[in-house]
Image: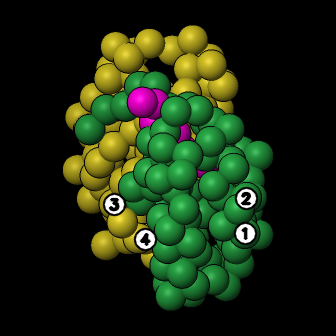
Chain colours: A yellow, B green
């Protein structure tokens, strides 16, 4: 199982509730691809969203996001992390 | 105290140890700006690094990263998050 960070643009003015609803749409179907979305962060002024997830492949992440209505081609496999 | 996600490019082929060393250089001086770098994720193939931090301002984050030797202009204030 690998970890991924993906990036969405164009979410200017999105609210906390709207982010939650979008995240819930991912959670509702993620198991069909063996994916789990752990966290998401939003900058509503810049319109950027960052999602941290685990899953079998970049393509699996992309398929869930696309089916949930917020596709992105910008998915990074973050194989190294520090805390 | 606000939360930030910043993005670095050009870190192709960077190792886990090199990421740790870079992160440690931030940690060594971060308190001088009231900043704390919580986590960092690296995609060594794409050369992307994402850092999650807290601090008083975007500029404070940028000053620590610059002094630590890895400046970036791409810092987002992530005022909303879900988990």
* Marks 3, 2 in one chain: no
Q: Quadrant of residue A46?
A: top right
* Marks 4, 1 in one chain: no
The mark found on residue B66 in the picture is: 2
Task: Give the chain letter at badge 1.
Answer: B
Q: Residue at x 52, y 33 (%)?
A: B56
Q: Residue at x 43, y 71 (%)?
A: A81
Question: Does the residue at mark 1 contact the one at mark 2 (Cβ under 8 Å)?
Answer: yes
**Residue A31 position in % (x across, y down):** 23, 50
Q: Nearer the viewer, mark 3 or mark 2?
A: 2
Q: Nearer the viewer, mark 4 or mark 1?
A: 1
Question: Does the residue at mark 3 contact the one at mark 2 (Cβ under 8 Å)?
Answer: no
Q: For this view, does A52 lie left or right of residue B70? A: left
Q: Which residue is mark 4?
A: A81
Camera-nearest residue between B40 and B30: B30
The answer to whether residue A48 is magenta is no
* Picture mark count: 4
Task: Give the chain letter at badge 3.
Answer: A
Q: Nearer the viewer, mark 3 or mark 1?
A: 1
How far apart in space, not on screen, are marks 3 and 1 (Cα)? Answer: 30 Å
- Which region is colored magenta? B1-7
Q: Residue at x 39, y 55 (%)?
A: B38
Tell me if mark 1 has few (under 14), some (14-19) or many (20+) residues whose alpha carbon lies within 10 angstroms of its own. few
How far apart in space, not on screen, are marks 2 and 4 (Cα)? Answer: 20 Å
Q: Which residue is mark 3?
A: A54
| Residue A70 visible in rendering | no
* Marks 2, 4 in one chain: no
| Residue A52 visible in rendering | yes
Dot 4 lies on which element? strand
The mark found on residue B69 in the picture is: 1
């Amino acid at each position: 199982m690998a970890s991924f960070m993906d990036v969405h643009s164009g979410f200017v003015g999105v609210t906390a509730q709207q982010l939650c609803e979008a995240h819930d749409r991912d959670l509702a179907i993620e198991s069909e691809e063996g994916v789990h979305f752990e966290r998401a962060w939003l900058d509503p002024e810049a319109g950027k969203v960052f999602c941290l997830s685990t899953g079998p492949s970049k393509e699996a992440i992309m398929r869930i996001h696309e089916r949930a209505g917020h596709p992105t081609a910008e998915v990074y496999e973050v194989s190294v992390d520090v805390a």
